[in-house]
Amino acid sequence: MKKDIDKYIQDVLEQHKSFNNIPSHYYTEYNVKRGLRNPDGTGVLAGLTAIGEVHGYVIDEGNKAPIEGTLRYRGISIEDIVENCQWEGRFGYEEVVFLLLFGYLPKKEELESFTASLAKRRTLPPGFAEDMILKAPSKNIMNKLARSVLALYSYDDEDPDDISTEALFRQSLELISRFPTLVAYAYAAKRHYYDGKSLVLHNPKPELSIAENFLYMIRPNHKYTELEAKVLDLALMLHAEHGGGNNSAFSIRVLSSSNTDTYSAVAAAIGSLKGPKHGGANQKTLAQMAEIKKNLKDWTNEEQVYDYLCKIVRKEAGDGSGLIYGIGHAIYTLSDPRAVLLKGCAKELAKEIGPEAQEEFELYASIERLAPRVFADVKNLHAPMPANVDLYSGFIYQMLNIPEELYTPIFAMARIVGWCAHRIEEVLTGGKIIRPAYKSIVERKEYTPIDER
């Protein structure tokens, strides 16, 4: 019977495909900002925030003028935050967490107390790892992460639906602290039950930074170098926040505007980031890079690189999208500050690893240089096309020997603080429930009795 029903449904879908396909001309006719984007690709202004600022262009006499990109957390440049932490030789993600949640830079004593407070919250509730992760593993770690966050609702000993200021901050601190543990354990379960590897779980260590602790937990021998931990710490700092308009931050604001619980709102943001158009972009970059490396005889020959990039843009190579992954951004025009910082980090890391990694880094750098010329020559597109954060982030994780299935979960592990900050701001601002309008384009019809159809 099931097969007959499935066949019937397939026939119906085949005959009525157009019912779920809105012709593109309607969007122009009704002036609909598809994807909440203006005609020039900029985002529709849908809200206000004091958390993060993404600045990549200025409007000059009605025209979009390119500038060097800036990213600010609570008004402070991410470059300044990173440079000061690196100059002082310390880990910086914990300071970013404090800044984004509380709105100001902590004093040394405040940061030490806050870091200790985060560290003591890393352990999962009793029985959670066995019951919620090991007994119900998933081949997709983002899926397991979302399910784990939803399950934590039931382990909240206080009122999980409480949206008071105190409850929002308590739940946020617990989730920020537990995300690395959830990801590490979900990875261990996936590795054991789906990949046939030994099951190894390391308890989180309170004396380690968040970056150190994560590397300690995901590696069977729990070994890592200081440079590896500092590189991961940088990636976490750069991915912590990116304004309220990115898809996952907007998702959490939409749900939070309904006054739902923290766990439901955060799970929705995870679901958004799981989408390959959002969190999986660096994996697409790596897949494309693997193809480029396979088909180039000489990585150092820029003419060969240029010719292959032209093939990708002409849809004669690659995945047929015509995109060079890791190039271009919806907001940044001349540069993506995150990519600039990661590029310098990738160069340093490649130098420490050896000649082969250095040669690969130079290939990435040549793609960054050549891509704008390729789009100009092939597509007659002359707008600036900077490298975005995804060009170098996947390469860095690869050099750190981090498994590819962890790339997007690491993104979530970093971005949880931005999500929580946006949730707190949305709830405490007390705005209206977010409800954009959709216009129906279906003509009105009379109901037909079933015997007359």
Image: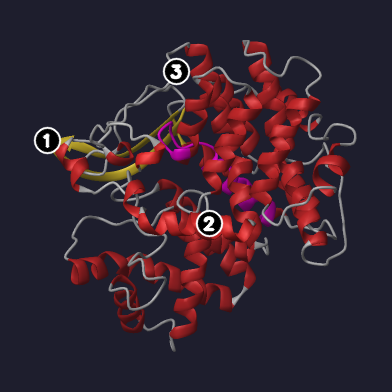
Q: What residue sits right under mark 2 in the picture?
A: 393
Q: Nearer the viewer, residue 174 or 157?
A: 157
Mark 1 = which residue? 62
C-alpha span from label 1 to label 2: 34 Å
Q: How many numbered marks does the figure carry?
A: 3
Residue assigned mark 3: 433
Would residue 39 be visible to someone looking at this image? no
Q: Is residue 91 above or below residue 424?
A: below
How many angstroms separate mark 2 from mark 3 (CA)? Answer: 35 Å
Q: Is residue 174 left or right of residue 38?
A: right
247 w.r.t. 434: above or below? below
What is the magenta range? 227-247
Q: Is residue 22 left or right of residue 115?
A: left
Q: Nearer the viewer, residue 10 or 194?
A: 10
At x 42% / y 55%, what residue is drawn?
13
Tell me the element at label 1: loop
Quarter location, residue 267 = top right
Tell me the quadrant of the picture where the N terminus can be found.
bottom right
Give neighbour class at mark 3: few <14, some 14-19, many 20+ (Cα, 10 Å): some
Whichever of callouts 2 and 3 sits on the residue coming sooner in the sequence is 2
Question: x, y percentage for residue 78?
Answer: 47, 38
Q: Amino acid at mark 1?
A: Gly
Give the numbered dot on residue 135.
none
Queried whether the magenta region covers residue 241, the answer comes back as yes
Which quarter of the figure is the C terminus placed in?
top left
- The residue lying furthest to the bottom in this view is 297
Kind of residue sitting beneath label 3: Ile
- Relative placement, left or right, of 357 versus 212 is left
Relative image position of residue 199 (x, y in whole percent): 87, 58
Identify residue type, mark 2: Ser
CB atoms at circles 2 and 3 under 8 Å apart? Answer: no
